[in-house]
Structure formats: structure tokens, C-alpha cells
């Protein structure tokens, strides 16, 4: 049983989450950047899905490039949702 496809979405979401946090830290929480966080998350996730499709083909459960990009983009967007969950629970 191949368990790699089960970890692809959480792995991409984690990488996107920490990449966005790093960008926010380096831009000193710039308000202009904060408006584009969801779009940035989708783009980073789509790029990671594409990279995984070509370089680690067993990790993304897709048969074509389009589905791999969609999986990556949705994983990236879930990273933004995760950030909001932590933000709202800490209030």
C-alpha cells in the first residue's frame, strides 16, 4: 500500500504555510502584502503541485498536470485557512 499520496496535501499545505509566514516576517507584516496572501498561497501551492508531479511523481495522486496543479493550489489555499483558524482561536 502506497501512503505517499495521503501526505501530499498536508505536506504542500505545510510548506506553503511556512513560506507565507517567512514572507510576512521579511516584509514586516506589510499591509499591502497581507491583501495578496490567499493569491500568493494558491500560486505557491500550484507551483509545488507542478514540481511534485514532475520530480516526485508518486506523491501527487493525479494522472495529468492540470489535476496536479489543482491539488497544489487547493493545498496552498488550505494553508491560508489554517492560518485563519489559528488566528481566530487565539483571539
Image (cartoon, grey):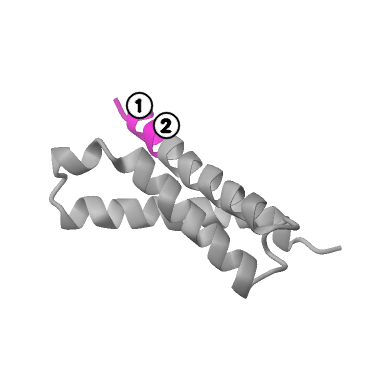
**Apparent side of residue 63 relative to residue 35 in the rendered image (left or right):** right
**Apparent side of residue 71 relative to residue 23 in the rendered image (left or right):** right
Q: Secondary structure at mark 2?
A: helix
Percent of width and height locating residue 60? 67, 59
Residue found at x 59% / y 47%: 70
Residue found at x 35% / y 57%: 19
* Residue 1 vertical position relative to residue 78 in the rendered view, above or below: below
Disc 1 to disc 2, C-alpha distance: 5 Å
Residue 57 drawn in magenta: no
Q: Residues within 10 Å of mark 2 (few under 14, many from 20)?
A: few
Residue denoted by label 2: 85
* Image quadrant in which the C terminus is located: top left
Residue denoted by label 1: 88
Most common SS among magenta residues: helix
Residue closer to the observer: 83 or 16: 16
Residue found at x 50% / y 53%: 46
Percent of width and height locating residue 38? 37, 39
Tell me which segment is drawn in magenta: 83-91
Q: Are marks 1 and 2 in contact (CB under 8 Å)?
A: yes
Amino acid at each position: 500500500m502506497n501512503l505517499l499520496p495521503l501526505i501530499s496535501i498536508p505536506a504542500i499545505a505545510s510548506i506553503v504555510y511556512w513560506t507565507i509566514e517567512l514572507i510576512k516576517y521579511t516584509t514586516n507584516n506589510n499591509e499591502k502584502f497581507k491583501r495578496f496572501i490567499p493569491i500568493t498561497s494558491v500560486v505557491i501551492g500550484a507551483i509545488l503541485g507542478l514540481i511534485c508531479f514532475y520530480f516526485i511523481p508518486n506523491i501527487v495522486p493525479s494522472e495529468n498536470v492540470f489535476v496536479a496543479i489543482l491539488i497544489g493550489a487547493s493545498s496552498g489555499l488550505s494553508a491560508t485557512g489554517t492560518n485563519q483558524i489559528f488566528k481566530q482561536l487565539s483571539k
